[in-house]
Amino acid sequence: MPRVAYFPDSFHEVNGVAHTSRNFVAYAQWHGLPFLCVRAGTREISFEQVGELRTLELRRSRGSVRMEKDLEFDTLFWRHGEAIRRELERFRPDVIHITGPSELGMFGAYFAWTMGIPLAASWHTNLHEYAARRMGWLTGRMAERRAVAIERGVEGSGLWATSQFYKFAKVLFAPNDELCRMLEKTTGRPCYLMRRGVDTECFSPAHRTRETSDRTAVLGYVGRLSVEKNVALLIAIVRIKSRTPHSRTIQNILHRDLVERLLLDQLHQRIPQRVARSYNAPVNLCRSLLRRRSLRRIYVSVHFRPLCSVSRP
């Protein structure tokens, strides 16, 4: 059985990489696989071992740069270099797996190179598209043609830089065929499909609590309220649907993770309650982090989950 050292970009945060990483660790522990997870966190005891599962959790410093509400990039993470090397030498991995160009990903790639260990890299986020979308604070003040040119330039440069990093890996993984083809073209490395799974028992329609006589059509969104998610598009969908002859009521449910109040205010400015009410389409904004049962109750009650993001999944 191969011994895997895993360096996730995030683990405790609210995002897809963290969710996938927690499932990787749970799977390894459940099946007794030799697995070392090196991650950022705030645990008092940095190293723990339970059976064949080993975890090294390292604190980020005050020199960290904020990337998301709950995600940072530590510019001083190099201070943990010896601790990481020590655990890698003790564990003796057959392969190192990274999830992106974070400080953890950089350390994983560095030690794979210096210790002669094969490197695998999985693609979870279209960072180049995120970078382009988040230029809106600047390009929004420019003429459309110039703004588009700048955003395309940022996106192209971001893809080139990210691809150079992924070239360090011997093998790549991506969640869909389109991304696999793109990575094979830009890196020259083989890329394999890494499918996402759904807990069909947890999210079964059998758990639905709505009355069968309730004919309300419900649109739902669960996720972060960052710029590239383009959640405001949901209201445009509500407007269009509300004008159709057979549409009586459309309810729009938004679930947010723990986002700053400023971002929440911006969302309300873009999606005014009065606009929703004028189309008989109330906007329910859940302000807390939902897990398992609470999240299941929302999911199984939703009829449509439009993909509004301006970046590809």
Image: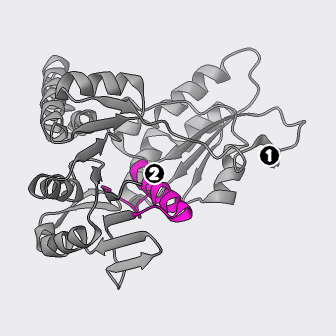
Q: Outermost residue, left direction?
A: 114
Residue 63 in sight here: no
Asked if residue 22 lies left or right of residue 243, the reply is: left
The secondary element bearing badge 1 is classed as: loop
- Which residue is pictured at 27% across the width and 29% down the height? 190
Q: What residue type is labelled 2?
A: Thr
Q: Distance between the residues labelled 2 and 1?
A: 26 Å
Q: Outermost residue, right direction?
A: 213
50 up-or-down from 101: above or below: below
Does 247 lie within the magenta span? no
Q: Give the range drawn in magenta.
A: 6-34
Please state the horizontal and vertical placement of residue 303, each as a whole percent of the image.
Answer: 70, 33
Please state the horizontal and vertical placement of residue 144, each as a whole percent of the image.
Answer: 20, 20
19 up-or-down from 48: above or below: above
Q: Outermost residue, bottom direction?
A: 44
- Locate the C terminus by quadrant: top left
Choose between 84 and 275: the one closer to the eye.
84
- Which residue is pictured at 50% across the width and 30% down the height? 307
Residue tagged 1: 208
Q: Which amino acid does label 1 sit on?
A: Arg
Please state the horizontal and vertical placement of residue 112, each as a whole percent of the image.
Answer: 17, 54
Q: Outermost residue, top direction?
A: 245
Residue tagged 2: 20
- Which residue is pictured at 25% across the width and 73% down the height? 90
Kindly identify which numbered label has been placed on residue 290: none
Asked if residue 121 lies left or right of residue 290, the reply is: left
Mark 2 or mark 1, earlier in chain:
2
Q: In the picture, residue 126 is in which quadrant?
A: top left
The secondary element bearing badge 2 is classed as: helix
